[in-house]
Image: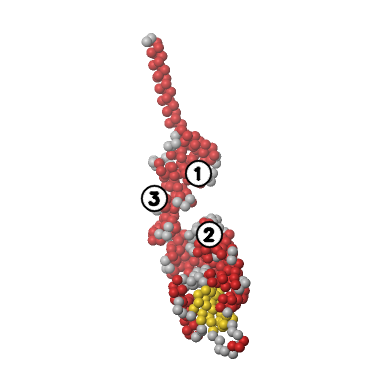
Amino acid sequence: MDSNIVTVIAFAIVIAILVIVCFVILKTLLAPKKIGNIQKLIKMGKSQQAQKVAKAILTKDPKDYVAHYWLGEAYLAEKKSELAFMEFKIVAQHMVFDGTISEVAFRKKLAYLYAKYNENDNALKEYLLLTKQEPKNYENYLECGRLFEEANDHAAALGAYQKVIQLNPRNAKAHAALSNLYVHTKQFADARAEIDTAIKLDPEAPSNYYYLGKILKETHDYPGAVKALERGQRDPEFRQRALIEKGSCYMLAGQLERATSEFESAVQNSKNDASQETLYARYFLADCYEKNRKIDQAIEQWMEISKRNGKFRDVSTKLNQYKDLQTNDSMKEYLTASPQGFLEIAKKAAKTGFNLVSMKLEATKYGCLMLATEESEESWKNARKQVWLVQFYRISKPIEEAAVQKVADVLKEKKYFKAVIFSSSGFAIEAVNFAENRPIVLAGKEMVESILSRAGI
C-alpha cells in the first residue's frame, strides 16, 4: 500500500479519536453548567424553562438523578406537586447523596409529599430517618407523632410528642397533641392539664379550643364544649371536625334540631367526600333525620356513604331495612309519619290486626305504647274487659330479648291479659325464643306490612 495513503488513514483515525475525546470532555464540562442553569432559572421564576433544560439533560442521560431532582424542584415551583413527587421518588430510589444536593432538605420535601398523597408509612420512614439526621429538630418528631397517631399507634405517638416537649417545652402543638392522646385513653385530668398549658402558650390558636371542646364533651360539660368548639372552628383545618363535635354535643343533650344543623354544616364544609370526617358527618346527620322521621333524607345520606365505603358501620343494614320504602307506601307511612300521625296509624293497626280498641295511647322515643281492650258486642259492654299492652316500634335495629322480657315483667306486675309488639325491623332470635309459650305476640315486619295494607294505610 502506498505510504501516503497509510499516512492519510492514520491521520484520519487520530482526528476521529480527538473529536470523540473533545466531545466527551465538552459534555462533561457543560453538564454541570446546565444543572446550574436549572437552579438559576428556578430562582428567576422561569420554572417552565428550567423544566425544558432538565428534560433535555434527561433525554441524553435518564440516569442523571441530579437532573431528576431539579426537575422535581421546577415542578414544585409550578405547584405541580404530583409530577414533582414522581421525580423525587426516582431520586430516592437511586441517588447516592454525595453533597451535590442537601439530603436533609430533599427528604423533608419527600416526606411532605408522601403524606400529601396518603402514603403515610413511607412518610413516617422519612421523618424517622430525619430524626437521626437532625436529632435536635423537634419538628421531625412532631410529624412522627402525628403519623403514629393517625396509624392508631398511641404509645409511639406519645413518645414522639414527649420528645418534642423535651426539645422545646414551649411547643403548644405538642402539648395539644398530648392532650388529645390522653382523651383517647380517658385520662381526662392529664388531658385538661396539657390543653391548659397549650392555651397558655398560644391563646390565639383555634385548634387548642377544638381539643378543649373535646375534653369538655367527654366530661359531659356540653355548653362549655360548644363554646370552646365555636372558637375551634375558626381554624379551616379544624372547622369540619369542630362542627361534628358540636353536633354530637347537641345530640347528646337531646337537641336534635341544632344537632342536625351542625352536621349539615359539617357536610357542606367537606373538602374530601371520602374522608372519615365527612363519612361520620353524613352518618350522624342521617341518624338525626331518622330520629325525626325524615327517612328519605336519611336514606340519601346513607347512600352517599355507601358510594365511598360500603362497609362503613351499619349503613348497609340501614339501607336494607328501608329498601321497601320505594315500593311499599304503607310501610313508608308507618316509618315517616309525624308523632301525632303515628298514633292514628297505631289505632288502625291494633283494630285491624287484633280487633283492639285503644284505652290509653302515648308517644315514646321508639314509637308509641297503647293499653287496649278487645272490641266486644254491645251486650257485653258491662262485662269486665281484659287489658292488652301494645307496643309499636319503628327503629332500625331488631328488637332484643331484653325489651321483650321487660314487657313480660309489666304483664305480670299489672296483671294485663296479653301483649303485642309491632316492629318494622323484626326481632332478634333470642327475643323470639323468649316469647314462645308466653302471652306475647311478636308482629314482625311482614305481619306489620300485611296489617297496614289491610288497614288501608
Residue at point 57%, 89% (across, down): 383
* Residues packed near mark 2 inside 10 Å, few (<14), some (14 to 19) or many (20 plus): many
In terms of depth relative to the viewer, which is nearer, 205 or 340? 340
State the separation of the CA atoms marked 1 and 3. Answer: 24 Å
Under mark 2, the amino acid is Ile
The mark nearer the N terminus, 2 or 1, is: 1
* Residues packed near mark 1 inside 10 Å, few (<14), some (14 to 19) or many (20 plus): some
Question: Nearer the viewer's eye, disc 2 or disc 1?
Answer: 2
Which numbered circle lies on residue 83?
A: 1
Q: Give above or below for 412 relative to 232.
A: below
State the separation of the CA atoms marked 3 and 2. Answer: 38 Å
The spot of residue 56 in percent (x, y) is: 49, 34
Dot 1 falls on a residue whose secondary structure is: helix
- List the residue tagged with mark 3: 129
Which numbered circle lies on residue 305?
A: 2
The spot of residue 58 in percent (x, y) is: 47, 36
Residue at point 53%, 55% (across, down): 272
